Image: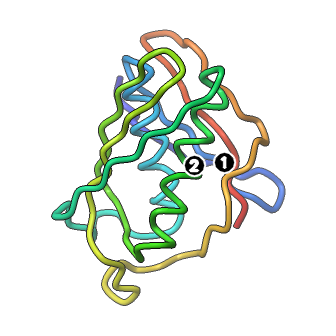
Amino acid sequence: MDIQYETFEHEADIGIRGFGETIEEAFSNAARAMYSVMFDISSIRPVVERTVTVAAPDTDLLLIEWLNALLALSDIERMVFSEFEVKIYGGRLQGRAMGEPLDRKRHGAVVEVKAATLHMLKVERIDGGYVAQCVVDV
């Protein structure tokens, strides 16, 4: 798969899509897409690791729980992340997020994201892998 993630316009919000050969890769790349909306992720050094565990009854809701947990972690610890690894076991997700403390000057803050929403939320099989998509309120 050539494209790992992308953003798209959706009314007043910004949509994100993560692609991967596995659902786990698609979820990791969706997180990367979300952070790329907020920051220049190439400026983020993956020197600090945090673990996130969430649960949900289906993969669509698991995606939103994952992204919301990352946003909450960023807000509470004032961290930004650029690298992600995800493992999904049934209705549970365990993810590793690697990043560093937020430095608005160096990280090139673009917009402040308040929450990931359920608009256009989907996780589905596509040719060559999976796509994980939602819309982010900005």
What type is the residue that disc 2 sits on?
Thr
For the image, the number of numbered tags is 2
Which residue does the image show at 41% across and 49% down from the upper left?
32
**SS for callout 1:** strand
Q: Position of residue 26 (x, y in %)?
A: 44, 29
Which residue does the image show at 48% across and 55% down from the upper left?
70
What type is the residue that disc 1 sits on?
Gly
Judging by the rendered image, the residue that carries numbered circle 1 is 15
User: Residue 134: which numbered mark, if any?
Assistant: none
Compared to residue 75, the image places residue 68 above or below, namely above
Q: Mark 2 and mark 1: span between their CA atoms? A: 5 Å
As drawn, which residue projects farthest toward the bottom?
105
Q: Position of residue 68 (x, y in %)?
A: 59, 52
User: Residue 7: which numbered mark, if any?
Assistant: 2
Q: Is the Cβ of the residue at disc 2 closer than 8 Å to that at disc 1? A: yes
As drawn, which residue projects farthest toward the left?
47
Which residue does the image show at 65% across and 27% down from the upper left?
60
In depth, the one of 35 and 99 nearer the eye is 99
Q: Where's the N terminus, which quadrant?
A: top left
Instruction: Name the side, left or right, on which 107 lies relative to 26.
Output: left
Compared to residue 115, the image places residue 40 above or below, namely below
Q: Quadrant of residue 124?
A: top right
The colour scheme used here is: rainbow
Q: Position of residue 95 (x, y in %)?
A: 36, 39
Instruction: Name the side, left or right, on which 59 lies relative to 74.
Output: right
Compared to residue 121, the image places residue 97 above or below, namely below
Q: Where's the C terminus, which quadrant?
A: bottom right
Which residue does the image show at 39% across and 18% down from the upper left?
22
